[in-house]
Image (spheres, grey):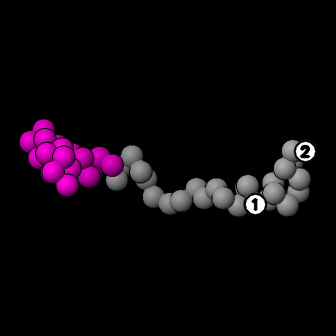
Amino acid sequence: MDSLGYVNTIRFFKQFDLGSGDYSNDRRQWLDNLTIDDIWADIQQRQTD
């Protein structure tokens, strides 16, 4: 607060959002069925784009 001042400190804190949900659980759902072939196909696709 000494460096930013009151107003900019409040602006700084307002940038944070805890969000909602369970990222770890969501990530498992997205990646559980992903195969090496899927990853390889995605890499190849990105190289041609």
Place residue 2 in its image quadrant.
Answer: top right
Q: Position of residue 43 (x, y in %)?
A: 18, 44
- Foreground of the two, 44 or 17: 44
**Residue type at numbered disc 2:** Asp
Is 3 located above or below residue 12 in the figure?
Answer: above
Closer to the chain start, of discs 2 and 1, is 2
Please report the residue visible at 60 percent of the width from the left and 58 percent of the height from the top.
17
Badge number at residue 2: 2
**Residue type at numbered disc 1:** Arg
Is residue 20 a member of the stretch shown in magenta? Answer: no
Q: Position of residue 40 (x, y in %)?
A: 13, 41
Q: Which residue is mark 1?
A: 11
Q: Is residue 22 left or right of residue 16?
A: left
Please report the residue visible at 34 percent of the width from the left and 53 percent of the height from the top.
26
Q: Which quadrant of the figure contains the C terminus?
A: bottom left
Could one spot residue 35 in this view of the protein? no
> Could you tell me which secondary element the residue under label 1 belongs to?
helix
For the magenta stretch, what is the residue range? 27-49
Main secondary structure type of the part rendered in magenta:
helix
* Residue farthest along the top direction in this orientation: 36
